[in-house]
Amino acid sequence: MKKTILPYVLKNAYDYNGSVNEKAVLGLVLRAHPELKKDVPVVLKEINILAGEVSKLTLKDIKKQLQTISPELLQKEKEEVKGPLKALPNAVKGKFVVRIAPSPSGALHIGHAYGAALNSEYATMYGGKFILRIEDTNPENIYPDAYRLIEEDAQWLTNNNVSQIIIQSNRLGIYYDYAEKLVNQGNAYVCTCDADEGRELKNKGQVCPCRNLPKNEHLQRYAKMFSGYAEGEAVLRIKTDIKHKNPAMRDFSIMRINEHIHPKTGKEHRVWPLMIFSVAIDDHELGITHVLNGKDHADNAKKEAMIMEMLHWTPPEYKHWGRINFEGFQLSTSKTRLKIEQGEYSGWDDIRLPFLPALRRRGYQPEAFKKFARNIGLSLNDKTVSQEEFWKMINSFNGECIEADSNRYFAIIDPLGVKIKKAPSGIVEVPLHPNRPEKGKRKLPVKEEIYIAEDDYKQLTLNKIHRLIDYCNFTFNKGKLSFHSKDYDSYRSSKDKGKIIHWLPVEETVNIEIKHPDGKTMVGKGEKVLKKLPKGTIIQLERMFFARIDSIKKEKVVLWYLHE
Ligand SMILES: [Zn+2]
């Protein structure tokens, strides 16, 4: 019975990031094996026991087991993840344009990565365009480095799938023309009321004294916004239904005066569009067919559609995904920026940060984020993703991207020099990759003394035959290690089997330093050849984890921890 049920428990655990829904498993089992219907209580009990065992495994191990005992279940899962995303209404192949529209406040983080990857994947699916539009029409909130950071992150994340880069502060003339058009049409007016009084009137559903002034008066007032009025003295408003049930929709502002110096345009401009206005104009001008963003944009989208209708344009299709709460992550761009400026973080690529420059430097691949986006899809429900869940998913996706190409090397933290009595010297050949013999082998010349990890040494037991990977077997007695035999196969399943450990020839090593996302650094020794690998190479340190070579210095190789 256990044999029949186990694949379904594994499959369910794999689909839901390690947690098992026992009722769902029961359904799957009974569908495949109706003969078990008469034993439901027994089946449930077995599922419960297996679920307990499986929940202790990592996602990687779950997958490995499933692959061994029931690969057909895994196959189905794979097709689902890789398949196209859910179709969008009115999307036409070749005539599909989407955009992401970040403000220039810092680098992109894992939340932006989801949105950018999802938009880019849809553009690919429909053979359309993916536009990056930097929305910098609020001169007060701009971080000059962000233009470059955002462009780099977006291009990296989408494998250079960005069709066009738009910077809104270059387009002020376009917004001015349309604003004037709206005044001319009688759809917009310049309001010079005191802000509090104006708000009070609006809340009561009453028009302010400016609204019904003649159009020519408003055209003059509009011209005066560019030179006459002071900041805060006048705003351009849209005429909507002053009794609209949502007060936020009543005669909202679309242009204002702001004297702040803008990092791109300096003091040249003082009249700035509010986001809803520049977004409405650009979505039309750039031919955006679908706006895919978070539901915090839903109210703005309604205002944007109102503006577009006044200009006799068809608004794009709006789809707003549910809020994804990345629980426990510090994703505030402004706080992170402050900590960088105060020197608490070394930059946006500080290893502790969940921002793309840091994750890229650790060795994460764009494909891992794309898989994450495809996996969640465009879901309208809010969801919470815990840190544990996020890393489990993204690491498993990243593992799929890098596993086959990452060569294996030995590294030892807290190395201890030991002699293996009577061990053969010579050159030991170790495969660069256990499953890819075509990659060849690395050669470790060994003479008497080797390094092993102090932790491994402490765990050696008497009366067992221990194994140095790809080298030889040894025994342990009174603190001494003695050669036992070369061949491993005869001990593989023997009851005498002891620990399998990795090692390094003392004379063939290089100092290494491994930086971890918790800010800690490990120090040890690695294979000498690490010094010759190109910077940026992703490797697997055997029996440890994946890491990326960050820098190679005269006295050491610095690695960044990636994941297990
Ligand atoms: Zn007014």
Image: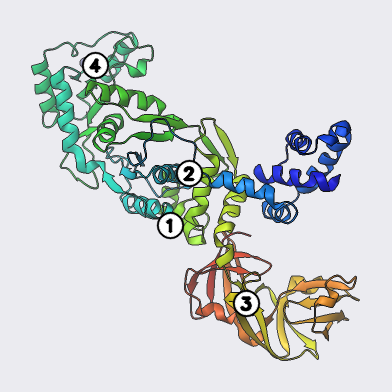
Q: At x 35% / y 19%, what residue is drawn?
A: 248
- How far is the residue under mark 4 from the one under mark 3? 71 Å
User: Which amino acid is tagged 1?
Assistant: Gly
Ligand 1 sits in which quadrant? top left
Left or right of 273, for residue 542: right
Q: Which mark is residue 239?
A: 4
Question: Given the image, on which type of amino acid does mark 2 rest?
Answer: Tyr
Residue at left offset 17%, top offset 29%: 178
Residue 168 position within the rendered picture, expressed as x and y whole percent measured from the top left: 25, 41
Any atom of ligand 1 within 8 Å of the CB at mark 1? no
Task: Determine the CA span between mark 1 and mark 3.
Answer: 28 Å
Dot 4: element: loop
Give me the C-alpha separation between circle 2 and circle 1: 22 Å
The mark that comes first in sequence, 4 or 2, is: 2
Tell me whether the residue at label 4 lies in contact with that at label 3, contact meaning CB atoms closer than 8 angstroms: no
Q: CA distance from mark 1 to mark 4?
A: 46 Å
